[in-house]
Amino acid sequence: MKMIKSIVLGSAVGLIAMSGAQAADLPVKAKAIDYVRICNLYGAGFYYIPGTDTCIKLGGYLRADLLLNGADYNPYFNGPGAAQNRLSNYYVSRSRSDFTIDTRTATEYGVVRTFAEMVFQWTSSNYAGSAPGAYSDTTPSSSTIGGGVFGLYKAFIQFAGFAMGRTVSAFDTPWQSYPAGGPDTLPGGTNHVTGVNQISYTAEFGNGVTGTLAAQDPTLQDTTNIYNTSYTTAGGLIGGAYGSNSFGGTRAPDLVGRVRVEQAWGLFQVMAAAHNNHVSYSGTTEDTGHPSDRWGFAVGAALSINTGGLDSIDMQAVYTDGASRYNFNSLMPTSYAIYASTGAAGAYRSLGMAGTADAMYNGTTAAGSTYGLETVKTWGFRGGYSHNWNANWEARSMVRMLSCVTVPTRLLRSAPTWSGWLVSLVRAIPTSTWL
């Protein structure tokens, strides 16, 4: 009996010892994985960043385009392309990849949002030849074979009604310059789809009514030309330049305000902007003096009507005085050559010239007198109708876009004497020049 008892106890000890040895050989238990969780607080597509309370959404698109009768992805406004001769490319192609990052973080003082939109793009080359002349490819250095460009469209922070950084302007409409599709180069309002640096504050009054005040940087997107007509030349006139561009730099941000009503039936907004015009000098040196700064302005209104489903009618109108970019947006050129056929004997083509400026002045005249700045006045309208056949197909149509520029012709007449026909041409320009 003692023998059996010893055997049983020995076996138990052996089992315990063996079990302990096996336990020591097992791997350490891994920590629980922090899986990515869906964030339902800010709409579809948001996820919590693991280990944080910040929600993130990644987005973007791919796009491939072909533009006929255009260059640099705009219609031809001047040069051989506008003349429709044999010395230019007749089409341009583009490929684009767009990437967006949207984050939201809830704090005890409210939600902090950051947003960035980055674009990677390649556009085919332009060509402007001569007859006779050697081939000269004008491909931008960033769009060479295997090249491309990077663009930062938006990068801003939003908190408690404030927005700081690069984003759309308060003067813009939700459809930018695309009331029913269409190109970037439609007059009748601004287009900051690629963003503009600013600081803004938006107040919500309830029932879809909001008000926005902003100070935005006009240096690149919202300034055209300030012409000093003392330096007008025949060649410059033909190119749409009615003098030397004597813009002296920015001294103040553009001040922009908007009131918007957005409800189930659609949208209505009114907007206004103040723009400072600051020139260099009347001559080429500091001692020649200069006109005083002059503030210009722009006012506009926009209306969108939902006509059922995703169909809508979008339209807007704008008037500017010394702030022409708020009608002729930053993606439009500032000089135009308008070609047409003519029935005159021996004449191949007729040519119209047009340019865009915020203001003009005559630095000096033969009598030595000077003039202050005179602002350029413009107005424009654009609109369109969008119809969705189904979820994948959409039909769009745009109304005719009208835009008018009023130039201070007294300054043109006081410019230096050119050949007789050029003087007559300038004096024949009416106060209202249609584009």
Image (spheres, rainbow, N blue to C red):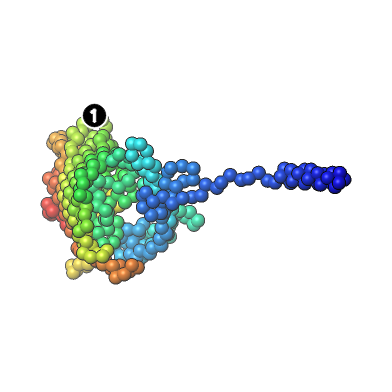
Rendered image quadrant of residue 85? bottom left
The answer to whether residue 31 is left or right of residue 131 is right
Local crowd at mark 1 within 10 Å, few (<14), some, or many (≥20)?
few
Q: Which residue is at 13% across, 53% downward?
A: 432
Farthest residue in the top direction?
Answer: 287
| Residue 385 sits above or below residue 155 on the image | below
What's the residue type where badge 1 is placed?
A: Asp
- Residue ID for mark 1: 287
Farthest residue in the bottom direction?
Answer: 389
Farthest residue in the right direction?
Answer: 3
The secondary structure type at the circle numbered 1 is: helix
Rendered image quadrant of residue 399? bottom left
Q: Which residue is at 21% across, 50% downward?
A: 208
Please identify the quadrant where the C terminus is shown.
bottom left
Q: Position of residue 100 (x, y in %)?
A: 41, 51
Q: Position of residue 51 (x, y in %)?
A: 49, 43
The answer to whether residue 414 is left or right of residue 217 is left
